[in-house]
Image (cartoon, rainbow, N blue to C red):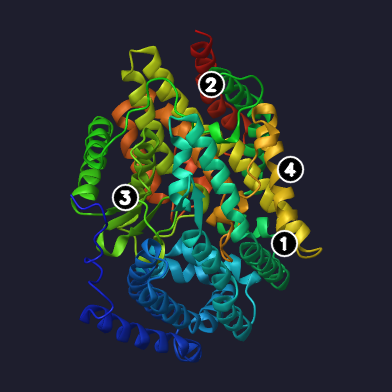
Amino acid sequence: MNHQWDLSPLYVGFDDPRYAADLEALKVAVEETRVLPEKQNAMESGEYLRYALELEEKVNELGERMASYASLRSSVNTQDVEAVSALAKLQKLFSDCSAAMASLQSYIGKLENLEELIAADPYLQQHAYLLRRRKESAKYTLDDKVEEALAKMDLSGGTGWSNLQEYLTSTVTASYRGENVNLSTVRNLAYDKDPQVRKDAYDAEIACYDKIKDGVCFALNNLKMQVNTECDLRKGGSPLEMTLRHSRMERRTLDAMIAAIEEYLPVFWSYLKAKAKALGYEGGLKWWDLFAPMGENTATYTVEEAKDYLISHFQGFAPDMAEMIRRAFDEAWIDFFPRAGKVGGAFCANLGFIRQSRVLTNFDGAFGDVVTLAHELGHAYHGQQIETHSTLNRNYSMPVAETASTFNETVIMNAALSEATDPKVKMGLLESQLQDTTQIMCDIMSRYWFETSVFEKGREGFLFADELCKLMHEAQLRGYGDGIDPETLHPYMWVCKGHYYSSGLSFYNFPYAFGGLFAAGLYAQYLKEGETFLPKYRALLHATTVSSVEDVAKMADIDLGDVNFWRSSLEIFKERVEEFLRLVEA
């Protein structure tokens, strides 16, 4: 079994004849796109719309294939000069389409007979949701030349700052017990069973940020300034309002979810204090003990054992998912282990054009890493459900992006808990689940509040590293309450989390809470309905790219604007916390 992913289904290198052919085809398609506005008056509206979308689909198909290859290569080696250079060239090509795409958006916005055009053409019917959203979004689209300028400036602006953060965090070294190790390695030690290892790793991690904090600070400030400026130019409201529009999500949904989470935060604080007590001290938990293993859940897994574990547990839930997991391991979809230059964390890239995905992890063998694999393979399963859509209809919004992944976590953890007979084993599994749940409640909310503060205060002036650390400290105090020892918080979480560093994707935090709670509600339905739920679940995932968040939820008879739905999901986690408290007392 390969422990590094195989990218040959895309290309075997930048000298691959397939890459050269696709690049030439892309250049031709981009040039055709650039002159697209000139054809508006020469073609009937329906004919023009179809021609424009088919051309856009061609650009996307070629561009995504090539950019995915370059990006995946870069993610496992941020010093891969060829990959970085190829991405820059592709981004330049994509930016050349900006003016034409803005013109198309404006054209759609002015069409008074759009619904008639859609009804008359099966191809346009296939893209009806996309066209309607573009008509609505047209009011925030700027002049064609301005849109083109913004796209080109982003290459050296937002994208450049994002690349800087990724480069600095992937190449910085931490001095751990006299040895220089990369950031991913030292952060993985937070899961070690030895408390002194966890403490030393935390100290080493915090110390290493001093080397890069100023560079990353400039990246964050300038990137958020760019987003604020763009919001002002578009007259589209705040970055959060723009994010909600892009997320196809109503503000009432977000408000209802956050209101419920704030109501239940003390439940998770009680878990953290109980864990501290179980580890031998009173008061709030030390930050370096957040991921301390408990009970008998200290076993480590090889890659092969992780594969067998996942397949056996998903076989009873959804055989097609178990088969996809087998393929992911056997066909080298996964890059497992940390190494110098590889980005931290984990992600899944859906490659619908080859009916596959690629998963990056920094696997260390702990049970949490097995759960991480389940999470990322949930994204792959989601990708499998939408791969029959056209290229233009394969983009799901941020909130539902975490639904299938978190649902997978729920499946794997609940199955493991139901099999546990030894109270110590059960405690270990339960605690592992509560670790993750606390992250998507307490930590995610702290990230949401931090990013809100950065956007607001960034309008008043530059936020130096110390000020950013202060804002992070305040946000963590609010999110973790008395569940964490305030003297041991992590003020540099803004440095290592790549979620903050995207000019086109702000507030990539609340979707994790959404995914966790929405998945919990869906899983509760699965327990009631059994196998009959699975077709509904697959249909729901399939619809995520062509529906609003609220309409997707309605397919499962869920009203996301009702705070009681979120409370019902949180009650499930509250019961888990209460069970954990009983086990700790016992």
Q: Mark 3 and 4 residues: CB-CB less than 8 Å, in contact?
A: no
Crowd class of label 1 (few under 14; some 14 to 19; many from 20; radius 10 Å): some
Q: Residue furthest right?
A: 460
State the CA–CA distance, disc 4 to disc 1.
26 Å
- The residue carrying mark 3 is 336
State the CA–CA distance, disc 2 to disc 1.
47 Å
Q: Earlier in the sequence, mark 2 or mark 4?
A: 2
x and y, in percent, of residue 560 in the image: 57, 39
x and y, in percent, of residue 39 in the image: 46, 90
Crowd class of label 2 (few under 14; some 14 to 19; many from 20; radius 10 Å): some
What's the amino acid at mark 1?
A: Gly
Seen in the picture, residue 82 relative to 187 is either above or below; the reply is below
Circle count: 4
What's the amino acid at mark 4?
A: Glu
- The residue carrying mark 1 is 237
Q: Quadrant of residue 417?
A: top left
Seen in the picture, residue 426 relative to 198 is either above or below; the reply is above
Which secondary structure, mark 1? loop
Q: Earlier in the sequence, mark 3 or mark 1?
A: 1
User: Which numbered mark, 4 or 1, is in the foreground of this view?
Assistant: 4
Q: Earlier in the sequence, mark 4 or mark 1?
A: 1
Seen in the picture, residue 403 relative to 502 is either above or below; the reply is above
Q: Quadrant of residue 390?
A: bottom left
Instruction: Identify the residue shown where x is 65% and y is 70%.
Output: 140
What's the amino acid at mark 2?
A: Leu
State the CA–CA distance, disc 3 to disc 2.
30 Å
Which secondary structure, mark 3? loop
Residue 474: which disc?
4
What's the amino acid at mark 3?
A: Phe
Residue 380: which disc?
none
- The residue carrying mark 2 is 279
